[in-house]
Amino acid sequence: MLLRRVISVSSFKNKISYMKYLLLVVFIPTVIFSQSTQQQPPHAIAIAVHGGAGSLKKLNLTPEQEKAYKDTLAIALQTGYNLLKQGKTSVDAVEASVNVLENCTLFNAGRGAVLTHNGTIEMDAAIMNGRNSKAGAIAQVKTIKNPVSAARKVMDSSKFVLMAGKGAEEFAALQGLQIVDTSYFFTPYRRVQLQKALLGDTAVLDHSDTTGMIAPADITGNPNDKFGTVGCVAIDKYGNLAAATSTGGIVNKEYGRIGDSPLIGCGTYANNKTCAVSCTGRGEDFIRHVVAYDISSLMQYRIINLHDAANYVIKEKLTKAGGRGGCIAIDKNGHIEMPFNTEGMFRGYINTKGQMVVSIY
Ligand code: ASP
């Protein structure tokens, strides 16, 4: 009797351990495996760009000038968007869009960058991958054709985050990036703009009232050589966010001044949990208020949405502190915000429905 009870209890125990065995060895791995191999539906893609914020009075721009800006922003958007459609990453897209703007003399980045006090060009750029918090940045470079691509090389092919000056240029050359004579970046209007800034003894935003952001056609004879720091944010079909910014900084800057653009968290930031942000404006204000990271942190810690976070930081906090500028930002759902507290900001987006909008004021 006792023996039979012992046998039945032991067979019961055996059954339990057999079930456990099945659960551990067969069932759980099957569930995990099938989940990991299940195709995630592609995430809706979206992209936004900016070309600088500032005193952009409607009257300053001729219809032709307005068209030139808008057309270039549209080309930049379409370039990044096409890559996203092909299944390329958001990092690929933001780099390619910023390259378009760097290669165009309309904007204060790459070719057409503003001049320093000494009449030289010193460019800064950054890029960040929201998927893994990897970031790369370069500052004070004078000969790298596309600074944002150098920032990407820093992110992908070095163990550092920020490189500056000659070292950054040396690294970019070793990485096979195109190096050009510094004269490549100069445009006639930048010299006029610097002269005005020198006369007024001001170190100003490209878009400032003092020097005039918009190059009058009668000064340059060319309505196309206009300016503005550039940036791009995007989400790819894998749901990953990225941000990039590229700039010549501010007119008449000196003593190796570096702005917010290459500083991760200040002018550029991306985090898959929250948003990707690229800023433009007086860099010192964006550094002091850690603007890009502040927007992300409000979303992460205060659980507020992108609209509220971005608008609060730019329109309330920064404005109260006397800061000027704006940003473009995109969240993990592809929602886009573009707040600014200046008269205008060159900006545009292609949203998750594929609709493109480009605006200035
Ligand atoms: N934020 C840039 C800087 O301070 C300037 C700009 O946005 O135009 O270097």
Image (spheres, rainbow, N blue to C red):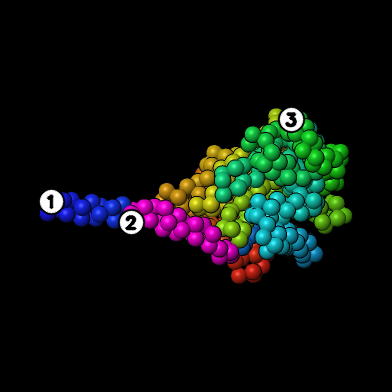
- In this orientation, which residue lies closer to the viewer: 71 or 80? 80
Which residue, given by chain and number where applicable, does mark 2 sit on?
19
For the point 65% across and 51% down, the residue is: 91
Q: Position of residue 194 (x, y in %)?
A: 78, 41
- As measured in the structure, the alpha-carbon distance from the residue carrying label 1 to the one carrying label 3 is 84 Å
What's the mark number on residue 167?
Answer: 3
Q: Secondary structure at mark 1?
A: helix
* Residue 71 percent coordinates (x, y): 76, 63
Q: Are marks 1 and 3 in contact (CB under 8 Å)?
A: no
On the rendered image, what quadrant is the N terminus found in?
bottom left
The tag earlier along the polypeptide, 1 or 3, is: 1
Relative depth, front residue between 209 and 246: 246
Range of residues picked out in magenta: 18-44
Sequence-first disc among 2 and 1: 1
The residue mark sitting in front, 2 or 1, is 1
Quarter of the picture holding the C terminus: bottom right
Q: Which mark is nearer the camera, 1 or 3? A: 1
CA gap, disc 2 to disc 1? 25 Å
Q: Secondary structure at mark 2?
A: helix
Label 3: which secondary element: helix
